Structures are given as C-alpha cells and as structure tokens.
C-alpha cells in the first residue's frame, strides 16, 4: 500500500509539472500581448510599456519567464497585472466566497441524487421512474441562465426579498442573527440552482449503475436464497453500485476553484469562477496561471483521494 501511494505521488507530481508547462505555453500563444501599446489609450505610452515589461520580466525568453513566474508564485510574490494586488490574497478572498456555495450545492446534489436514482431503479418502468426521468431531462435541457431568471422572478414576486449579491444592502447595525440569516438566504437560491443540474445528471447515473448491478448473477442468487428485498437492494446491490462514485467524489474538488461563472454572474456573487472570467477578459496572466495551477492541484488531489478510497472499499485493489 505504501509503495502504491509513493508511486501515485511521484506520477502526480510529474503530471503537475507538465500541466504547468502546457498552461504557461497556451497562455502565451494566445493572440496579442498584455504589454502591447493600446492606440485608444493615449496614457499608455511606449515608455510605460517598457517599464511594464521589465517589471514583470516580459522582455526575457519564455522559459526564463516561466521560472520567474513560478519562483514568485511559490514565494507568494505574484501580483495581478490589473490592480497590482497579491494574487494569493485575491484568490483566497474569492475562495472564501465560493466555498459555502460549493459546500451547500454539493450537499444538496449528493443528498438528493442517491435516493431519487435508487428508488427509480428499484421501481423501474413505474410512474415514479417515468416522472423522475422526465424531470431529469427537463432540468438538463433548460439553460442555466434561463432557469436562474425564472427562480429570481418567482422568489422576488412571491416573497418580496432580495436575492442578488451576498448580503442585503443597508443592513446597518442589524443583529448577528439577522446578518447570518440574510447570508443564508442569499446563499440558498444560487446553491439550489447549481445543484439542480447535478441532481438530474447524478440521479440518472445512480439509476443506471443500480440497474446494471441488479442484473448480476449474485443478486439473483441473493434473491433465490430468500433474502428480503431491502437486504438485496441496499446491502448487496447498492454497495457494489457505489464503487464508480468513489471516483466522482474525488473529482468534485476542482469545483472549489472553478465554481460557476453563469451563476456567480447572474447573482453578482464574487466567487472564483467570476474572478477567473474577469481575469481572462483583462489578460491578467498571473491570475489565470495561478487559477489553472491550483485547479490542476485540486484535480490531482481528488484523484489521489479516490485512489485511497478505492483501497478502502475494494480489497481486490489492495491485492
């Protein structure tokens, strides 16, 4: 087991290095330069461009720029080209904003998907299965921005409460309880919206996995031995159907950094996805590269967690 963990860490470290190189090359192969003279802005003179290039080592060779960037990144000295603020500080602030949105959305998705998918598989072809299939494909088909506006109009018209932003403007000297509940209320709608698509997709996947396992020989043998339906479904079938979801569980970690650009933009939520989108529009390379690197770390960390969980749930892998 220790040798497996060691090999996995070495492989993921090598993968991370190549990801950093490829990301750096792709960013710099994009058309245009962040330091080029803007003819529409007379204040952006060639002298300013030269100072900008020297300050951020853009006048050096590409491999030298790579070394300088990751030297500054690992020492915490990377700054944004847009506002000259520390990239680590900016990402940490946005990360704290995206974290509750990610946690609540993930809990809603995984809590509802499994009961819906399992019950649909057990009662295959019945009214419940047909209804969940219809609503799942409906939620998958509806564009996120359209569904968001429908929810906003419904909530505002029926409950007459604000839903945009992270908090209600003008709370003033409200008590801590009102502040907490106001934040929870603003968090609820974008979390539910982000979870709807995940519930629709994941419940279908749970259903298909359960149906595949239910058709195996050992399940028929369990029924022939006289076991109760609950033991067959939940002890034998469900336990083996959950194995693929170990991988999926590890791959949800990148959602911490990516978030949802559409949801955060519609609800004016200052999260990670919105910051990355704004950095792309502004050609803020340090922010883009840092977000890409952290995303790669989270993906590799998620796969590593999945590997460890597989060792726990499936003894065959240990052997």
Image: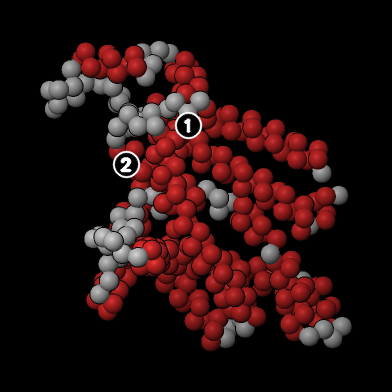
Residue 306 visible within the image? yes
Q: Name the foreground residue: 151 vs 159.
A: 159
Mark 2 lies on residue: 278
Q: Position of residue 130 (x, y in %)?
A: 52, 81
* Residue 281 x/y as whole percent: 30, 38
**Crowding at mark 1 (Cα within 10 Å: few <14, some 14-19, many 20+):** some
Q: Nearer the viewer, mark 2 or mark 1?
A: 2
The picture quadrant where one finds residue 217 is bottom right
Which residue position holds label 1? 23
* Residue 227 image offset from top left, x and y in percent: 82, 84
**Residue 279 image offset from top left, x and y in percent:** 34, 38
Secondary structure beneath label 2: helix
Task: Point out the tag, 2 or 1, that comes first from the N-terminus.
Answer: 1
- Which of the 4 quarters of the picture holds residue 263? bottom left
* Number of numbered discs: 2
Q: CA distance from mark 2 to mark 1?
A: 18 Å
Q: Residue at x 58, y 83 (%)?
A: 125
Q: Is residue 218 left or right of residue 304?
A: right
Question: Circle 1 — which element?
Answer: helix
Q: Quadrant of the N terminus?
A: top right
Residue drawn at x 61%, y 56% as measured from the top left: 249
| 265 displayed left or right of 130 | left
Q: Nearer the viewer, residue 33 or 215?
A: 33
Which residue is at a point 54% across and 72% down the rendered structure image? 112
Near-viewer residue (156 or 314): 156
User: Does any portion of residue 25 appear in the rendered image?
Assistant: no
């Amino acid at each position: 087991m220790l040798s497996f963990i060691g090999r996995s860490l070495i492989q993921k470290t090598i993968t991370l290095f190549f990801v950093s190189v490829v990301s750096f090359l792709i960013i710099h192969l994009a058309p245009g330069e962040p330091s080029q003279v803007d003819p529409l802005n007379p204040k952006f003179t060639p002298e300013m461009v030269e100072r900008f290039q020297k300050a951020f080592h853009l006048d050096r060779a590409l491999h030298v720029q790579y070394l300088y960037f990751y030297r500054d990144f690992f020492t915490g000295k990377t700054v944004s080209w847009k506002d000259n603020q520390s990239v680590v500080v900016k990402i940490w602030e946005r990360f704290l904003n995206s974290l509750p949105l990610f946690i609540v959305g993930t809990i809603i998705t995984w809590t509802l998907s499994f009961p819906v998918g399992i019950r649909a598989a057990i009662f295959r072809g019945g009214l419940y299965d047909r209804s969940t299939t219809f609503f799942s494909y409906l939620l998958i088909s509806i564009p996120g921005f359209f569904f968001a506006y429908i929810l906003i109009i419904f909530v505002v018209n029926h409950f007459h409460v604000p839903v945009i932003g992270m908090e209600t403007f003008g709370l003033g000297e409200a008590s801590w309880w009102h502040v907490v509940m106001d934040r929870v209320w603003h968090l609820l709608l974008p979390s539910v919206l982000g979870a709807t698509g995940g519930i629709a997709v994941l419940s279908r996947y749970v259903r298909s996995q359960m149906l595949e396992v239910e058709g195996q020989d050992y399940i028929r043998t369990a029924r022939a031995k006289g076991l109760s339906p609950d033991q067959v479904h939940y002890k034998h079938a469900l336990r083996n159907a959950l194995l693929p979801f170990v991988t999926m569980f590890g791959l949800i970690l990148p959602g911490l950094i990516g978030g949802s650009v559409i949801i955060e933009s519609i609800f004016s939520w200052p999260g990670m996805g919105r910051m990355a989108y704004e950095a792309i529009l502004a050609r803020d390379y340090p922010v883009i590269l840092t977000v890409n690197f952290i995303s790669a770390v989270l993906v590799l960390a998620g796969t590593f967690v999945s590997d460890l969980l597989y060792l726990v749930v499936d003894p065959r892998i240990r052997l």
